[in-house]
Structures are given as structure tokens and as C-alpha cells.
Image (cartoon, helix red, strand yellow):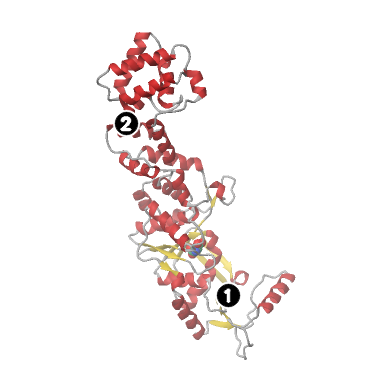
């Protein structure tokens, strides 16, 4: 069974780079009928917060990404880590190092002066003398000093590291007994049964160290898949300004979960030239072997395009539900259908959709000056007056076509073009010259409100 994980450090909000690896991990587990588990890497007490963990869970909830089983918190697993530290010490695979801070600094400075790589020199590796007093030893693991460490990566292929270039006997527990990052990651991934690690390639340099831990503890290696970063259009690391922001900010901007997930799955993964993927399709088609080897480029236009697609293709029930976030309560009746059918074609975001809905449903109290200037030429008031009367006289006004017929009748009677009616009417109804079709607007707001808005515009003496 495939078991994947998402292992965020709760230092802040969930950003889209993290969400993308979470999504990839989720998809790959689901595709295989496996499990997607969540581990909170909260060992850095100074930088971690419960709010950050909650923010991550909230984002998952919004997006409908469910993790399997209980959440694992590293902060609650000190006993487990201590057990493995003891085991490695007992087996002679790790040792206590009594080097003082001053000594270490001196060593580093000498190495730097000699233009050597700074690393621990193995002073206490085979030490059997009397340890110096007053020093709480750190625990170091015996790492290979020579030879190759090959990460058999599912995305990048074999990545070869030379032990002497990257490894030394690194610390697995600090002087106060606290275990270190690479040590606990390897232990947790093993104990949690994770056999497919999908994570950002900013972690690739940690992998050889984690492999040393796996080896020392006799754990089988998981399959590693390191996903290239997301870059901005200039090919640089994504900054806040480009979109490397809190996932929940996308909610606030009016993106739908479906669009955001679809957008993210295509950042670094593709299936032919297909752009639109339902969740089922993503699960069915995603495979880490198809993850691109180079960085992907974040493109806001693409996200907008996808979002518009999902808005357009959502049912009105779904949209009404999503719009409740904007304080809009649209109950299901014919008017709502016309309203949403008309407006969902025009909105790139839910926020835009909400403001279009509000624009149509609220009686305008202000009129855009430029629109007024353009629309209220000679005769406009008379036309509006006539139109209002005609509407008033009509009994059966329900659908857009009914209102259209009234406009047509007036155009014929007054021998004028549609534009002559449409322009002042649009300003009267919506306060400006842009917006959705007038027939639809009138059908949505109904006869009384149409007449009220016309009367208001006439009184406003535009
Ligand atoms: N906690 C790490 C992070 O938030 C991820 C570790 C991993 O995926 O192995 O970047």
C-alpha cells in the first residue's frame, strides 16, 4: 500500500508551494488506494505555533483535502526518538561528542582559512578516554566519510552525492537531548509506514543525511520524489508578490478550491496538453514519474482562466453555496437561475461574481458621470418615461424575452434604434453603461424594481 505524507513545519500559514506537494502526495496515495497522512514537524518550539497548525488544517478543510488517520505531532514523540538514540549509542553507530563551542568555532575558522569545507573532524568518533568536565555532549552519528550516496529519485533519477563533500558525523541529539531534524524525519517516515516521500527539492540536500539514519537503524528506504520549485515569470523564486502567499488568501481573492487545485496540479506536472482536471481525473492520472524535472512557472492569468472556467461550469446550487461567504443568500427560484446563468459567464473570481450580483440586485444611488454624459442625450428622459409606462401597462412580465418585447415595441413606436433606449435604461438600472444584458437584469429584479429604478433616474434629472 502506498503511504504518502505531508510534513509541514508550523511556522506560518500554508503557502502554495507546500500545498502543491501536499496535493501531489494526496493524489498519489488516493490513486493507489493508499493513505495520505499528516505530520506536524513542531520540534522548533521557538518558531512553531498552534495557530499555524490550525491555519494548515483550515486550508485543507477549505480545499477538501482529507488526511487519513490521526495527525502525528513530532513534539509528542521525544520518547521514541530517545529510544533510537540509545540504540545507536549502544550499537556503536553513534557517539557522544564533547567538543566545546569554542573548539568547534576554532575548527571552523581554521577550515575556512584553509579554504576547506567546514565540517566536524571526528575528534570523539573513537574516543575512549575520560571526557572533559562540564560539557553536555551532543550525540553524533557515524556517517560514511568516503564513497557515494545515491538518491534514487523518482523525479530526478539517480542523484549522486560524494560523502566527503557533504557529510560529516552530524549531530542527531543536542546537548539537552533534543533530537535534530534529519534524524526525526527519517524515524517518523519509517514508523509511519511512509514509502513514498514527495517533497520540494529544497530538501534534496537533506536526503543523504536522512539516508545515513535509515541505514544505521536498518530501515528500508522509501521512494524519494523531489519536486522542483515554483518560479515566477522572471524565473526567480516565487515571492509574496507573485503569489507565494497564504493559501487562504486565494479564498479571499475569490478562487474556488477546484480551480486552485487544478492550477497547482499543472505546476510541475502534465498529462499531454490537458489543462482541466476534475479531482477524479487528477487522482486517476497523476503519477510522480511525470513530474517535470525543471522548475514550473507561476502564471496568474492561467489561474484566472481556470477559475473563470470553474465558475462558468459550476451549478447554480454550488455557486449559491460559495456565495454565502459573501453574505449573499440566493434561494433557488427562477430569478436566481437567470441571475447566475447570466453572471457566471462574466466573472473571473467569486469576489467578482458577488459584486456583479450586488450590482444587479441593489438599487443604484449614484450614477457614473461618464456613462450619464454618454447616455443622457436629447430625448433620453422621454424615452425612459415611455418605457416605464409601457412596462407598467404590461401584465405578463417574467422572462428576459418579455422585457425584450417591450423594448422592441417602444423602438418601433418611437422609430428609434435599440441603443437609444438601451443606454439610458442601462444607466437607470445599473448606474453605469457596463454590465450584463438588460433583458436579464429586468427579469431578475422584476417589474416593480425596474419601474422604481427608471423613476429614480428620471427624478435624479440626469
Ligand atoms: N517540515 C518540512 C517543511 O516544512 C518538510 C519536511 C519533509 O517534507 O521532509 O519544509
Q: What is the C-alpha distance between the residues marked 2 and 1?
A: 66 Å
- Residue at the spot of label 2: 338
Question: Of helix, strand and loop, which one carries label 1?
Answer: loop
Residue ranking furthest to the left: 395
Q: Is residue 141 among the parts visible in the rendering?
A: no
Image location (x, y in percent) of residue 202:
55, 60
Question: Of helix, strand and loop, which one carries label 2?
Answer: helix
Q: Is residue 65 among the parts visible in the rendering?
A: yes
Relative to 278, is 147 on the left or the right?
A: right
Camera-nearest residue between 331 and 318: 331
**Which quarter of the image is occupied by the N terminus?**
bottom left
Identify the residue at horizontal 38%, vertical 41% (top origin). Answer: 310
- Residue at the spot of label 1: 170
Mark earlier in primary sequence (2, 1): 1
Residue ranking furthest to the right: 113
Camera-nearest residue between 325 and 89: 325
Image location (x, y in percent) of residue 259:
41, 45
Camera-nearest residue between 113 and 290: 113
Task: Specify few, some or many for label 1: CA neighbours under 10 Å numbering under 14, 14-19, or 20 or more.
Answer: many
Amino acid at each position: 500500500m502506498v503511504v504518502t505524507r505531508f510534513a509541514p513545519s508550523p511556522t506560518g500559514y500554508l503557502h502554495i508551494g507546500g500545498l502543491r506537494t501536499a496535493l501531489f502526495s494526496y493524489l498519489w496515495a488516493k490513486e493507489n488506494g493508499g493513505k495520505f497522512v499528516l505530520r506536524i514537524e513542531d520540534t522548533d518550539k521557538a518558531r512553531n505555533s498552534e495557530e499555524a497548525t490550525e491555519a494548515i488544517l483550515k486550508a485543507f478543510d477549505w480545499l477538501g483535502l482529507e488526511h487519513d488517520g490521526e495527525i502525528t505531532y513530532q513534539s509528542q514523540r521525544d520518547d521514541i526518538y530517545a529510544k533510537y538514540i540509545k540504540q545507536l549509542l549502544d550499537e556503536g553507530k553513534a557517539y557522544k561528542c564533547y567538543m566545546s563551542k569554542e573548539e568547534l568555532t576554532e575548527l571552523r575558522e581554521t577550515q575556512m582559512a584553509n579554504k576547506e569545507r567546514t565540517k566536524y573532524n571526528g575528534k570523539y568518533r573513537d574516543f575512549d578516554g575520560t571526557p572533559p568536565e562540564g560539557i553536555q555532549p551532543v550525540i553524533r552519528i557515524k556517517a560514511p566519510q568516503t564513497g557515494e550516496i545515491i538518491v534514487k529519485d523518482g523525479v530526478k533519477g539517480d542523484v549522486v552525492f560524494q560523502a566527503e563533500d557533504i557529510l560529516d558525523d552530524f549531530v542527531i541529539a543536542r546537548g539537552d537531548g533534543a533530537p535534530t531534524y534529519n534524524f526525526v524525519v527519517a524515524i517518523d517516515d519509517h514508523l509511519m509506514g511512509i514509502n513514498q516521500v514527495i517533497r520540494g527539492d529544497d530538501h534534496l540536500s537533506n536526503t543523504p543525511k536522512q539516508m545515513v539514519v535509515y541505514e544505521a537503524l536498518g530501515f528500508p528506504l522509501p521512494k524519494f520524489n523531489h519536486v522542483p520549485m515554483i518560479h515566477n515569470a522572471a524565473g526567480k523564486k516565487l515571492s509574496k508578490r507573485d503569489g507565494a502567499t497564504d493559501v487562504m488568501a486565494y479564498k479571499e481573492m475569490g478562487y474556488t478550491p477546484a480551480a486552485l487545485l487544478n492550477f497547482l496540479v499543472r505546476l510541475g506536472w502534465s498529462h499531454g496538453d490537458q489543462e482541466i482536471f476534475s479531482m477524479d481525473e487528477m487522482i486517476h492520472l497523476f503519477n510522480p514519474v511525470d513530474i517535470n524535472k525543471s522548475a514550473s512557472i507561476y502564471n496568474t492569468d492561467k489561474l484566472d482562466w481556470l477559475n473563470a472556467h470553474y465558475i462558468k461550469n459550476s451549478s447554480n446550487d454550488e455557486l449559491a453555496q460559495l456565495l454565502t461567504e459573501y453574505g449573499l443568500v440566493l434561494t433557488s427560484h427562477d430569478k436566481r437561475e437567470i441571475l447566475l446563468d447570466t453572471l457566471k459567464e462574466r466573472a473571473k473570481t467569486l469576489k467578482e461574481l458577488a459584486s456583479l450580483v450586488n450590482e444587479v440586485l441593489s438599487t443604484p444611488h449614484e450614477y457614473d458621470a461618464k456613462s450619464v454624459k454618454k447616455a443622457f442625450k436629447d430625448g433620453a428622459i422621454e424615452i425612459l418615461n415611455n418605457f416605464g409606462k409601457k412596462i407598467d401597462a404590461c401584465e405578463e412580465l417574467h422572462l428576459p424575452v418579455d422585457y425584450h418585447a417591450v423594448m422592441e415595441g417602444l423602438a418601433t413606436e418611437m422609430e428609434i434604434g435599440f441603443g437609444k433606449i438601451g443606454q439610458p435604461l442601462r444607466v437607470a438600472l445599473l448606474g453605469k453603461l457596463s454590465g450584463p444584458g438588460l433583458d436579464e437584469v429586468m427579469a431578475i429584479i422584476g417589474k416593480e424594481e425596474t419601474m422604481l429604478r427608471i423613476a429614480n433616474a428620471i427624478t435624479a434629472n440626469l
